[in-house]
Amino acid sequence: MPGHDIMVIGASAGGVEALSTLARGLPADLPAALFVVLHVPATGRSMMPEILSRAGPLPAAHARDGEPIRPGRIYVAPPDHHLLVRADGIGLSRGPRENRHRPAVDPLFRSAALAHGPRVVGVVLSGSLDDGTAGLAAVKGRAGVTVAQDPAEALFDSMPRSAIEHGVVDHVLPVGELGPLLGRLATESPARAPDGAPTPDMEQEVWMAELDPNAINSDHQPGVLSGFSCPECGGTLWELEERGLVRYRCRVGHAYSVDSLLADQDETLDDALWGALRALEEQAALARRLAARAREHGHAATIVRFARQEEEAARRADVVRRLLLGGHPSRTSVGSTPGADREAAAPISAGGE
């Protein structure tokens, strides 16, 4: 029986350093294939394969859709594509974003768990918010092994801490010790078989990541109607709960953890407030211009009416301006600094990542 020969790894902010350290500690004869998702911008050229190839003994490259899985290699998700592990090889998809990202960690973990069950090792490294927690739950549910970087040493501790707090992690280690751990796990046979077949919900979520029309059009949607709307497309969100972990997904497949949904709602609110400020400032300017014209023609009553409209629009604009300057409470409720993923990725993006 093969050992744990499918290893899926997810990281976000601070992930370049963590992935480089992990790659450095891998054995050169590792009898397993590694699949890596790092949150990166959709545009630009990724240098992550070159970074990992230089850091450790295993060759790394961007994954290609349909290529076979070979041990001793690192497959990296290219920008703007989900990386998926199928039973017969590797898949790439421009399916719906999950947790505000494409590539995202959860689709990789979930697809590997569905296709390879107990042969899978899932690893969550440094990152903001909580992408990877639901994916690790899927790996653990299919009898795979789950690992997290020690949050105490992670540059951004939210991703590994979320996974640990939800009870879906078997091993917690400093990143420098993860390479030897993966080397050992690759030679060990799985300790147990999965408890039954994959659930229909897991299968449907993997198909959604592939943008399968049958999954989108199915009368069965995972979870129950939540009453909330998807910040990205406006569709209804279904609420899913497993192992105490609450998630949301819309019909076309956009998926959110609680924290990522709050973060996306916060951005939607921010955009709405800027739009409101623009409309109110324009309304005040229009009323001021019309009042000036009324004054030129000596229309006293019209002057008063437009002056009142200008004053009311300016008052409302001032309220919105104070909200924008003061920020929104939800920004502090998701356990990270606003935009931390984007800020952390920016220097790499500027250089190609």
Image (cartoon, rainbow, N blue to C red):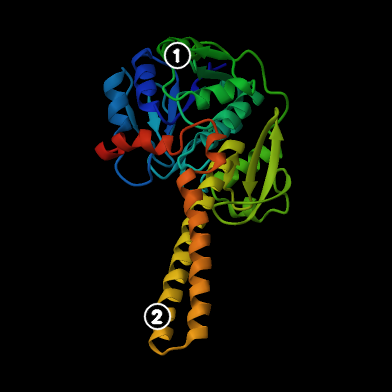
Residue at the location (60% across, 51% down)?
230
- Contact (CB < 8 A) between labels 1 and 2? no
Residue 106 % position (x, y): 54, 34
One can see residue 276 in this view: no
Residue 264 pos. (x, y %): 53, 45
Judged from the image, the secondary structure of the residue bearing numbered disc 1 is helix
Identify the disc placed on residue 178: 1
Q: Nearer the viewer, residue 349 or 278?
A: 278
Q: Which amino acid type is marked by label 2? A: Ala
Is residue 151 left or right of 17 when viewed as pictured? right
Dot label at residue 151: none
The location of residue 83, given as percent across then percent down, is 46, 38
The quarter of the picture where the C terminus appears is: top left
Mark 2 highlights which residue? Answer: 292
x then y, percent, for residue 172: 53, 13
Residue at 61% over, 37% down: 258
**Visible residue check, residue 268:** yes
Q: Decide if residue 221 is on the left or right side of residue 298.
A: right
Judge whether 175 appears above or below 334 on screen.
Answer: above
Say above or below: 8 vs 338. above
